[in-house]
Amino acid sequence: MIKKIKIGMVGGGDGAFIGEIHRIASRIDNRFELVAGALSSDSSRAIDSGENLGISGDRIYTSYEQMARTENARVDGIDAVVIVTPNHMHFPVAKAFLQQGIAVICDKPVTLDQLQARQLAKIIKESGSFFCLTHNYTAYPMVRFARELVQEGKVGKIRLVQVEYVQDWLSDKQEDGDNKQAQWRTDPKKSGAGGSVGDIGSHAFNLAEFISNLQVSEVCADIDAFVEGRQLDDNAHVLLRFKQGAKGILWCSQVAPGNDNQLKIRIFGDRGGLEWAQENPNELWYSPLGEPTQKLTRAGHGVSEVANRISRTPAGHPEGYLEGFANLYRDIADALVLHQQGKPRPPELQLIPGITEGIAAMNFIEAVVSSSKSNSQWVPLNEQ
Amino acid sequence: MIKKIKIGMVGGGDGAFIGEIHRIASRIDNRFELVAGALSSDSSRAIDSGENLGISGDRIYTSYEQMARTENARVDGIDAVVIVTPNHMHFPVAKAFLQQGIAVICDKPVTLDQLQARQLAKIIKESGSFFCLTHNYTAYPMVRFARELVQEGKVGKIRLVQVEYVQDWLSDKQEDGDNKQAQWRTDPKKSGAGGSVGDIGSHAFNLAEFISNLQVSEVCADIDAFVEGRQLDDNAHVLLRFKQGAKGILWCSQVAPGNDNQLKIRIFGDRGGLEWAQENPNELWYSPLGEPTQKLTRAGHGVSEVANRISRTPAGHPEGYLEGFANLYRDIADALVLHQQGKPRPPELQLIPGITEGIAAMNFIEAVVSSSKSNSQWVPLNEQ
Amino acid sequence: MIKKIKIGMVGGGDGAFIGEIHRIASRIDNRFELVAGALSSDSSRAIDSGENLGISGDRIYTSYEQMARTENARVDGIDAVVIVTPNHMHFPVAKAFLQQGIAVICDKPVTLDQLQARQLAKIIKESGSFFCLTHNYTAYPMVRFARELVQEGKVGKIRLVQVEYVQDWLSDKQEDGDNKQAQWRTDPKKSGAGGSVGDIGSHAFNLAEFISNLQVSEVCADIDAFVEGRQLDDNAHVLLRFKQGAKGILWCSQVAPGNDNQLKIRIFGDRGGLEWAQENPNELWYSPLGEPTQKLTRAGHGVSEVANRISRTPAGHPEGYLEGFANLYRDIADALVLHQQGKPRPPELQLIPGITEGIAAMNFIEAVVSSSKSNSQWVPLNEQ
Amino acid sequence: MIKKIKIGMVGGGDGAFIGEIHRIASRIDNRFELVAGALSSDSSRAIDSGENLGISGDRIYTSYEQMARTENARVDGIDAVVIVTPNHMHFPVAKAFLQQGIAVICDKPVTLDQLQARQLAKIIKESGSFFCLTHNYTAYPMVRFARELVQEGKVGKIRLVQVEYVQDWLSDKQEDGDNKQAQWRTDPKKSGAGGSVGDIGSHAFNLAEFISNLQVSEVCADIDAFVEGRQLDDNAHVLLRFKQGAKGILWCSQVAPGNDNQLKIRIFGDRGGLEWAQENPNELWYSPLGEPTQKLTRAGHGVSEVANRISRTPAGHPEGYLEGFANLYRDIADALVLHQQGKPRPPELQLIPGITEGIAAMNFIEAVVSSSKSNSQWVPLNEQ
């Protein structure tokens, strides 16, 4: 029996979306225990939310700074904090806990801007603390399998990476109503320079680099706020060039009626092609050049141990978004234990996204915005 | 904060399939706590499994009878036991716990045969204890929504119910190797009179009655063990007649290459049709007569509170088998609390399958076997 | 340049459905020329229809008997007649032309009943004339490829044949309005003993035998006329047993809302599975046991000459119902020329359906009706 | 009975792809008769091909100039010529026939370059002759229906037009073998400035403008020849801006393994979305904002007369590429008769693509190539 990891949470109070997702994901494999929280910037909501979650009264905080100090001082203090606030709070909260030596599990995008991301990198390095970023889509079994097929050369040398993340929930001006998600996600002070680019484009970017094992070198972008009066982009068209010579297109949108969370990626090399879509994540389509397309299914025939390691149910009993997220949490649990023991991570745990992926995504967001402002000139991504 | 329900488990030791599914499902919504177990009939495996699950040493049992007595005697004894043994043990284990006044959450099919099922019904009644049966497919949000559409008359008077549950994992003689799942599921002493009929046909039958709100009155069946030397059927073809006049076909198979867990149901009435498949459970297809077919998605446009109540993630972030199972567990938690309080269940909790559904499925299994033996004569299902 | 085959048509006047389908199918490969017709039993409609089709005035007939005699007497008389009348006229028309030594291309089902079918067989034999039956679905390239895969043993020994043909157009009582198609197809005097069974069940039966290369030995059926007052069945549930030991289910329906012409077949053997559906006829799904499912596409990778011979467009440029029908017509053209020359058919032309398939389908229809009348007893199909 | 239109063909000899497609398409509705041809630049192939097609010996030509003169001089000369040569011959052939007053049906792209296209426009105008261009994808029934839904405001004001045409057949260097299609299509002297852009990107561009009823104003492109040594692009990434404010992406590729002829378009407005794909052309997906997505099927429920006019088979009996092409031919037949009678075209016949669409596509191709050469600067399309 492995000891459970004690976690606290900042953000994620009653009614929030991603906080509950993290809580469920952390429970699925029974490796974490939520024991503390500063769940809202609103005191009474923070307290109510804590009580609803069964957190002991003395560990329900109304200030994250106080939480960081107090938890660090406790003998039974938390091992890690989960940050699920709007983007603009990621940096100060992460900083506060890292400086107390508490591990950080942070939602994406990592910070409000690239500058903060680089400062955070420094803090992580100096503190020697554990930091990871929940780019959850990388932990779907069939995404891992796609990456493995690429690495094994099953698609040959990659020529094309086509990725899109398409939604419709901001097709009209939701932020004018009482939709809190819409409000902060369209507010540059809370979201950063990117709207759809930051919220979902960053996921698409991260997934493209993760599966292809390539790095975007420059972008040529045309972004828009189609809904009148919206402060941030709700659609982005981005041409990609990769260091290794491949080309690509990234499209993200929140104004495409009929799409819920259509994150889809297609990769084509000189020996084959791959296709995966998040709305049906148990399937991966593989087309060896000149042969029939194969439908590979999670835990099914022809799927490797890399994917099966993070699979819980038999083929045909679909796993979904929460299990994908839970895969990340399970690996974080193992990595955190190794970190506490001062041991190195085995290869599979090196795939957990961290500050490097965080900075890369911030570079991407800022390059996209910059390219679009310059009428779609190619803008290089900063070297890290 | 709601107090967690303390559960014990019988069966489900290391390497078992369905035990781990129940444990994950019970954790997802944080309403249960596993504190005791008699996890295997093999003592050392029972002990190892208990330790691996972090169960306290004094509550790891090697005998379910002892567990029932001991837990009942403890002040902090379990509220409920989860039975995830092979079928033949369902009855004795359930009986032991019910008679100690401990609630029972039992995997399907309810018992080895109909006679046992009726005895169990008596025991439940006499004990006044809580009993439920995990026909998990009924708890998918879009299955509930399908049922609601039927009840609202959206398909009109039902004429046809076509259901199939198709797998391929027993296409060759797995039971001759070291596949424990295959061994007990093809052994009449452990599984009962039905092979595929009992294992998956019972799910299909239950789902058909659940969504349609109709009752099968008689069956005409032709069942086979296609794999030479297999003791139980691995394929069943069943014609259905419903009390209310509808007709149907039920097909279940474990020898259909290319199928993992293809549970699919189609219902047609004089005003419309519905189609749902477990391998893509977030979608429900609705065809109003004379209008275009609609694709309804979990948590998406046009979906009602009945489905949304048991939905955790936004549309397009797929939920799967474990979330469906967890829906049942969450409802069981609420129902159990009400039971302890002596209060009646609200309508949505009345959908939790229980002994009635268990007996119906046993009636179905036995009628199918009987019909097939009589060269496919129509055999009525026993009245309960 | 091959000489065009001169054809006449009986039935298929303005407004008819299947007549125009035959005409287009016969034109696609430029092997036929329509030069004569008795296009309607209504004289003025026969004349108008003939003129609209550009048939020369002296070859527009108002009596098929007269047409048979006159055309036979002409030096430039037709080589073949196409019979596209309601079912009850197939026999007398075919007889009239065969006895004049004119080849017959007949729509299915071959006659009104089995007795007529056997009489027709005799007439064909005695006349030495050419006769074929347009079970058009057998001529889709991917159906032919499926049959080839079966013959090559790619699915191993067949255990299961599941076939369905599902429509919704008779979900309400169309025959009471001015829908001529509905009127004759629900009229036993014009359609025969089977409604949906005769109209579409016969296609499903034929396709199942064609691809599997197995023969149905007996059926167990439950058929219904769900629409009140309808004279013939609009739904049929049929269990199948094949001579070679396989089992199957055939479902046909005209009252399943949301289905247009959903003819779908699945075949499972001890080494693999196949699935094909008419509404997307360019795809064939092949599942070798224990390997990923393959998506085979018409004219695509891994598809053989057997399918490519009857393919006109590159993969991804879909062919449809008319091209499938045209494949049959092209083969009929070749077979007819060989017949005229007294030469034997090569193997690929032996697949053209004829009186044998016609009788088999009549046997099937009558056995289904008979089984259903006897409360679903197993009824053997007559030996031919 | 309508008199058949007499056509001749230039190009399309034995073994060519698109010539046979045109011939079948012209036959399907029985409105054309092929009576003359200069089917190859190779004399003996021209003669053999003509004979194989049953063309009378005196109308088999080895020179298109001679054919134009001779046919014009004949009393029974052709009404129209079909040009199915490689691109570089479109202009001289069209010119020769137009100047003889013979109508021209020309395959796309219209000419080798924009300059030729504008010259051709002048010749058409001065000759007063009939000219049309076979952008066949615009004639699929569900494409027409999509256009109608847009015009009726069913998607509201269009924000996004995403179109792609993806193949894999040039993933390796086919042009080095004996693949004649690959040879001329990758040869700038025969194809023009665009490789994939000209061959399939032009179709995607045309379809996008056709359905959306918007005009591309400028493009920002990044094109590649991924296969080493290839002379023309085999992949193009193009950002689009439309005059009316919408944005879009056009991707075309011939190096994406697993894709045959995946032409797909998605249009999103402020009130709804549409999706159509050529490989399954009988379906159109319509998503009204805030409502479930609808699956509209050719000839099915909710589909209008605009689409049904050009539909031949009932819903569920798929029509394909050839029928789509034939729709264009049928409309051309009607338009040509009106032209001969000096009458104006009704609205539905005004949709036949002509020189305007031809010039637009040439503008597009050249702007894409120019943008890519300037490192993806936005390049306006020439005004016509």
Image (spheres, coloured by chain):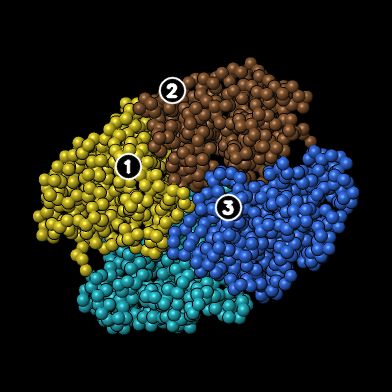
Chain colours: A yellow, B cyan, C blue, D brown
Please give left or right for residue B354 compared with residue A367 in the image.
right
Q: Position of residue D156 (x, y in %)?
A: 50, 34
Q: Circle 2 marks a residue in which chain?
A: D
Kindly indicate the quadrant of the structure image that contains residue C163.
bottom right
Q: Is disc 3 on the same chain as disc 1?
A: no
Amino acid type for the residue under numbered disc 3? Glu
Q: Which of A315 and D131 is in front in this view?
A: D131
Please report the residue visible at 32 percent of the width from the left and 30 percent of the height from the top.
A378
Q: Where is residue A336 in the image (x, y as percent from the top left)?
A: 19, 56
| Residue that mark 3 sits on | C305
Which SS class for mark 3?
helix
Amino acid type for the residue under numbered disc 2? Pro
Please give left or right for residue B212 compared with residue A31 in the image.
right
Please report the residue visible at 48 percent of the width from the left and 83 percent of the height from the top.
B115
- Mark 1 closeness class: few <14, some 14–19, many ≥20 residues within 10 Å: many
The tag on residue A205 is 1
Please report the residue visible at 17 percent of the width from the left and 58 percent of the height from the top.
A338
Q: Is disc 2 on the same chain as disc 3?
A: no
Is the Cβ of the residue at disc 1 closer than 8 Å to that at disc 3? no
Q: Circle 3 marks a residue in which chain?
A: C
Please give left or right for residue A56 compared with residue D9 in the image.
left
The tag on residue D380 is 2
